[in-house]
């Protein structure tokens, strides 16, 4: 099974320091939906692993989160793409759970759901925390220079990023790289 694990905010859609709290605030990044569709058309399954501490903070509820994902899925379908599943951590950082990235819990859930070893499975995100948990289970780390990743444009990655992290301009550049291999 060809599987890709994507972060959501800053990777697929615009991120916000005030949190993405509603479908109206969920705005896809240029080319991101097309990139997912391109991966799907080449036989790749795409899942999302996302910290959603806005739930734990009471900034939005599960109905709002589901509405955001419904919008994402509807817009993806218009491009002929799909996300097979969304795995999310609802906890705030001070809860010290096992599922909040950079902890590996969401990635372990993905491996269990698909009955897969995650060695070599690409994980794509816009921050170090998006990559560390997956890399600890053998995922191949990919940083996109969108969202929080924009701060690394033209710079070496600081220590703390998983060894071998590949850097891409955006999700489409990652998709093109992946499909060219």
Image (tube, rainbow, N blue to C red):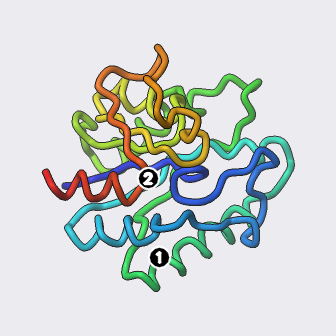
Marks 2 and 1, how far apart at CA:
17 Å
Does residue 7 sit above or below 39 in this rendering?
A: above
**Element marked by disc 2:** loop
> Residue 79: percent from the left, percent from the top?
41, 81
> Residue 171: percent from the left, percent from the top?
41, 55
Residue situated in front as seen by the camera: 81 or 119? 81
Does residue 85 sit above or below 110 in this rendering?
A: below
Residue shown at 20% from the left, 68% from the top: 42
Residue that label 2 marks: 170
Residue situated in front as seen by the camera: 110 or 48? 48
Is 46 displayed left or right of 133 in the figure? left
> Residue 47: percent from the left, percent from the top?
41, 56
**Element marked by disc 1:** helix
Residue situated in front as seen by the camera: 167 or 23? 167
In the image as oriented, which residue stretches furthest toward the left? 181
The numbered dot on residue 34 is none
In the image as oriented, which residue stretches furthest toward the front? 154
The numbered dot on residue 76 is 1
């Amino acid at each position: 099974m060809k599987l890709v694990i994507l972060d959501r905010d800053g990777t697929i859609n615009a991120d916000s320091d005030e949190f993405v709290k509603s479908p109206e605030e969920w705005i896809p990044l240029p080319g991101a939906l097309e990139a997912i569709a391109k991966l799907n058309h080449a036989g790749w399954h795409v899942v999302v692993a996302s910290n959603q501490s806005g739930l734990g903070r009471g900034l939005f509820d599960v109905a709002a989160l589901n509405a955001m994902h419904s919008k994402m899925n509807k817009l993806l379908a218009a491009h002929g793409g799909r996300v097979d599943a969304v795995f999310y951590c609802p906890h705030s950082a001070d809860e010290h759970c096992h599922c909040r990235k950079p902890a590996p819990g969401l990635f372990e859930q993905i491996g269990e759901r698909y009955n897969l070893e995650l060695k070599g499975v690409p994980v794509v995100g816009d921050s170090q925390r998006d990559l560390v948990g997956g890399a600890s289970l053998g995922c191949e780390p990919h940083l996109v220079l969108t969202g929080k990743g924009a701060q690394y444009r033209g710079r070496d990655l600081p220590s703390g990023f998983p060894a071998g992290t590949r850097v891409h301009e955006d999700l489409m550049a990652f998709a093109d790289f992946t499909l060219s291999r």
